[in-house]
């Protein structure tokens, strides 16, 4: 189902048949759905030709459930212990062999008469209330799930068996993070929890300020070096002591400005990046910053705006801004090395580094490879197609130089980069 072509036709085209498809073919990558798009959208969707340097190949692909549908989500696969762990929003959780895509184990947490089961006849008549899984992470030989219903679940990473379950007040919209036996869970209510990774027992909680209007997402916490690092909806980076949850320090990264609540949104909805004693973070309203871990001192600031995670590779930071422009910067001083605007407004994901390239996905199911040194677009692969359900909504992950990506409808694909 994956093709390195101008664009895979959506389900509507397949249903209406080849005759109709031929009658609406335009130059470039046009499809039946072009009928319903205005000129601005058509201009965004039409990809300009590139000078391809190589041809990516699909190694395997697999359907793991219903995906995330049209909901906001940052669910993405996680690799650990030589296994690939993938979840969908409805409640399906699977462990896959990253080499072959073969299923190692599977669980379903859709709620149906107190049991997690699916309709065995068809996903069109799926049973159960959605588990609304919002984040997945792996540590201490366990897989941790957080849900928008406030459930936190620990599974045995090898077998998928439930180790413990607990409930916290607030939606979990980002992956939890664990270190030193403490699982840090951030919630949309502005409250962060520290749970015992072995039992799920609450060790501490920290309540932060929440402004009247915020973005839907939240910052994913980072548990490391004895601290829990997280961005806030008030534009701050904060560090809590991992053992007790006590606030060690907080630093203002972005300051509200403007006359309306919408203009004053300063959310840091990205997961902080920690490297060599420095925290890198970015806010929605336009501040990229490097902050000293020990003191909270701001080392440098630059004007970039994003709700996508920053990518660190060597001495380079890769940033995808709110308009899908892509930048490379020197992490040591914030100096811009290059910019790429060829994918502007395509709802590009955060970047992932693979070999000599970075790769991003977009809202029309394409993966794009950029040269790390120049930012030039050097390869492209259609892994989705024209159907909205095939959008790539989360940054790919890289396992042994193989790109793993997931679409909104739950298709997982492993793609090789020559």
Image (tube, rainbow, N blue to C red):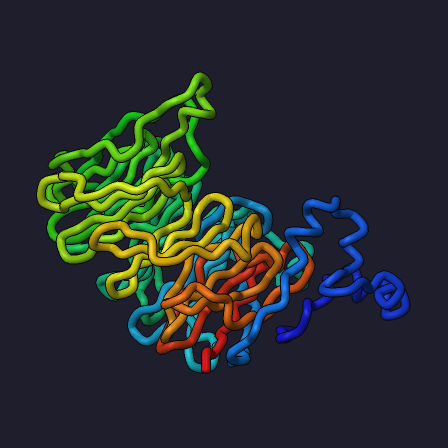
Toward the left, the furthest residue is: 294
Q: Quadrant of residue 343?
A: bottom right
x 36%, y 31%: residue: 266
Is residue 60 in view?
no
Q: Quadrant of residue 241?
A: top left
x 47%, y 79%: residue: 416
x 77%, y 53%: residue: 34
x 35%, y 78%: residue: 400
Query: Nearest the camera: 364 or 116?
Result: 364
Q: Residue 393 location in percent, x, y?
A: 52, 54
Q: Is residue 295 left or right of residue 328?
A: left
Toward the top, the furthest residue is: 259
Q: Residue 205 location in percent, x, y?
A: 21, 35
Query: Nearest the camera: 204 or 317?
Result: 317
Q: Is residue 157 above or below residue 267?
A: below
Is residue 367 in view?
yes
Numbered circles on residues, count = 0
Q: Is residue 114 left or right of residue 366?
A: left
Q: Is residue 65 above or below residue 323?
A: below
Q: Quadrant of the N terminus?
A: bottom right
Q: Is residue 348 left or right of residue 155?
A: right
Q: Residue 337 location in percent, x, y?
A: 34, 58
Q: Quadrant of residue 264?
A: top left
Q: Is residue 332 left or right of residue 400?
A: left
Query: Nearest the camera: 372 or 131?
Result: 372
Q: Residue 148 location in percent, x, y?
A: 43, 42
Q: Quadrant of the C terminus?
A: bottom left
Q: Is residue 142 above or below residue 221?
A: below
């Amino acid at each position: 189902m994956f093709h390195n072509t101008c664009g895979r036709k959506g389900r509507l085209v397949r249903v209406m048949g080849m005759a109709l498809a031929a009658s609406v073919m335009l130059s470039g990558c046009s499809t039946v759905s072009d009928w319903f798009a205005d000129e601005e959208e058509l201009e965004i969707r039409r990809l300009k030709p590139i000078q391809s340097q190589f041809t990516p190949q699909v190694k395997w692909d697999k359907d793991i459930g219903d995906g995330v549908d049209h909901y906001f989500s940052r669910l993405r696969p996680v690799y650990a212990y030589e296994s690939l762990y993938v979840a969908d929003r409805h409640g399906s959780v699977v462990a896959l062999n990253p080499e072959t895509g073969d299923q190692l184990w599977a669980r379903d947490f859709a709620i149906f008469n107190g049991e997690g089961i699916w309709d065995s006849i068809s996903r069109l008549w799926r049973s159960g209330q959605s588990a609304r899984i919002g984040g997945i992470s792996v540590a201490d030989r366990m897989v941790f799930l957080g849900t928008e219903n406030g459930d936190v679940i620990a599974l045995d990473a090898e077998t998928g068996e439930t180790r413990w379950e607990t409930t916290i007040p607030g939606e979990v919209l980002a992956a939890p993070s664990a270190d030193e036996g403490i699982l840090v869970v951030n919630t949309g209510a502005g409250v962060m929890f520290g749970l015992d990774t072995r039992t799920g027992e609450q060790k501490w909680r920290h309540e932060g300020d929440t402004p009247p209007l915020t973005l839907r997402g939240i910052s994913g916490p980072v548990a490391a070096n004895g601290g829990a690092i997280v961005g806030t909806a008030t534009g701050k980076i904060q560090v809590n002591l991992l053992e007790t949850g006590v606030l060690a320090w907080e630093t203002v990264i972005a300051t509200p400005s403007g006359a309306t609540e919408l203009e004053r949104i300063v959310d840091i909805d990205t997961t902080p990046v920690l490297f060599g004693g420095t925290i890198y973070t970015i806010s929605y309203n336009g501040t990229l910053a490097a902050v000293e871990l020990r003191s909270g001192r701001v080392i440098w600031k630059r004007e970039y705006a994003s709700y996508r995670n920053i990518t660190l590779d060597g001495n380079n930071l890769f940033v995808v801004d709110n308009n899908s422009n892509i930048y490379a910067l020197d992490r040591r001083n914030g100096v811009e090395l290059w910019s790429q605007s060829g994918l502007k407004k395509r709802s590009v994901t955060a970047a992932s580094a693979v070999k000599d390239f970075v790769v991003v996905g977009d809202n029309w199911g394409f993966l794009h490879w950029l040269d790390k040194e120049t930012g030039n677009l050097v390869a492209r692969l259609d892994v989705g197609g024209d159907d909205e359900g095939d959008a790539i909504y989360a940054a790919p992950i890289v396992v042994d130089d193989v790109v793993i990506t997931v679409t909104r409808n739950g298709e997982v694909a492993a793609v090789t980069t020559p």
